[in-house]
Amino acid sequence: MTTTARGTETPTLGHWIDGRPAAGGAGARTAPVHDPATGQVVAHVPLAGTGEVDAAVAAALGAFPAWSQVPLGRRASILFRFRELLVEHTDALAGIISREHGKVLSDARGEVARGLEVVEFAAGIPQLLKGEFSDQASTGVDVYSFRQPLGVVAAITPFNFPVMVPLWMVPVAVATGNTVVLKPSERDPSASLLLADLLRQAGLPDGVLNVVHGDREAVDHLLRHRDVAAVSFVGSTPVARHVHATAVAHGKRVQALGGAKNHAVVLADADLESAADALTAAAFGSAGERCMAVSVALVEDAAADRLVELLAAKARAVRVRPGDHPDADMGPVITRAAKERIEGLIGGAERAGARLVVDGRGHVVDGHEDGFFVGPTVVDGVTADMEIYREEVFGPVIDVVRVTGLEEAVGVINANPYGNGAALFTASGEAARTFQRAVSAGMVGINVAIPVPVAYHSFGGWGDSLFGESHIYGPEGARFYTRGKVVTERWPRTRDAAPPASFHFTGGAGL
């Protein structure tokens, strides 16, 4: 426990290593964990150095030989029990998310639900790892293939989904036989500790999942650690680029998901009321702190004035409250620095000539004057050379860019370096088919603003939104955490019956 300047005690969290809580090392650095709605410190978190990372990796490495040999049905049963524990603890997890992230409770419960989908997918691991078999590939010879786990894998997750993104990685990694070191965001770390304890209660053996808190020092040590075989990462593009380059240079398999600038195209034939509803939720839900948030509306000229009018009315109606308020639609952003950065980008857009239709700067919630609140913001007349368009704002801001039609809109999207998600609102099947085939994005929505795939597909973008070849969770996730092995097998009855060995590649047994 530590004492703040106001004389109140705040807890100091620990790591989770080898199946139990572990304190930070002597003299360990710590970081404050804030309640974004009040601005107050609610906990302190230790920042792991190389010693704590080494201990977590050693625990995972020690657990790997036994865990990799656990029957698939036993792994699945642990995940089924874990799923039930997640359901039982949904409200507890949602409360942690709301307190440390600021997300409204309904959204936090939805985050848990989306993570549950991946747990359910991973519980079907026997089906995913069946392998292939070719009988009598040559005379008396069978060939078959199967997939085996990699070893110790690192999972490095962001602040904006402190439950969902760990659940994108950990269940698939452990289901396929790997052991894991999870490094959650130090801004909202408590949810990962509860997840680790729930997995312990579900029967996961000690050391299979370890949690270390930290900053760049811990991350870089994981990226270079000789006993870490693979790295999964979700975060900003600059960090994703660093994670990918560093880990690959040290011989690791990497999936690194970066930032985004998600566009939604609204054609004049769309249902504008429905489109405005969807864009409002996609832009301002979770205070815009989603990698799939829609931050740009590319609107056909004929519909632009009406859509801007609708967006403005809906933005002003959004109820900005602390996350645990029963009437809240949107909570605060994660830190004071994030608030200041977002408001700076809004001001820069105005100076660059854009029109602030709804200005969320300086938003104050009564009784929470020190909270990190930014109100919903609608900016019209944005152009591609403006900073607010080029940067990932990661806040409750939607830019309106006016275009002549679908062809120009697709050109704008494809010129952007990001390629995470893109959506189209239209009544035309022809336009929809043209868009989904032409747009450079890994995930596409047709009259769906946030096209996050269900768990039995895979999540991932293109361009600067993804470094490495693999998308996350789903079938690609299962392949990422395993490597293939092919066996060519012959069982002659007696030595006399076996064909003589051949010096020719295609001779003898026909191989």
Image (cartoon, rainbow, N blue to C red):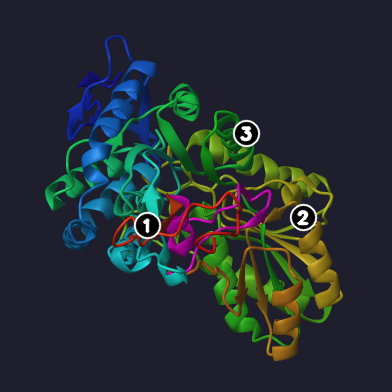
Question: Disc number at residue 104?
Answer: 1
Amino acid found under the numbered disc labelled 3? Ala
What's the distance in space between the residues labelled 2 and 3, CA to CA?
22 Å
Q: Nearer the viewer, residue 17 or 263?
A: 17
Q: Is residue 336 above or below residue 461?
A: above
Alpha carbon distance from label 1 to label 2? 31 Å
In the displayed image of the protein, which residue is found farthest to the top?
Answer: 27
Q: What span is colored magenta in the figure?
A: 456-481
Lower sequence index among marks 1 and 2 = 1
Q: In front: 162, or 323?
A: 162
User: Does the rendering let one see residue 305?
Assistant: no
User: Residue 82 location in percent, x, y?
Assistant: 20, 57
Label disc, if present, on residue 245 of the rendered structure: 3
Above or below for 176 versus 15: below
> What residue is at 40 percent from the left and 43 percent from the top?
150
The residue to which callout 2 is attached is 416
Q: Secondary structure at mark 3?
A: helix
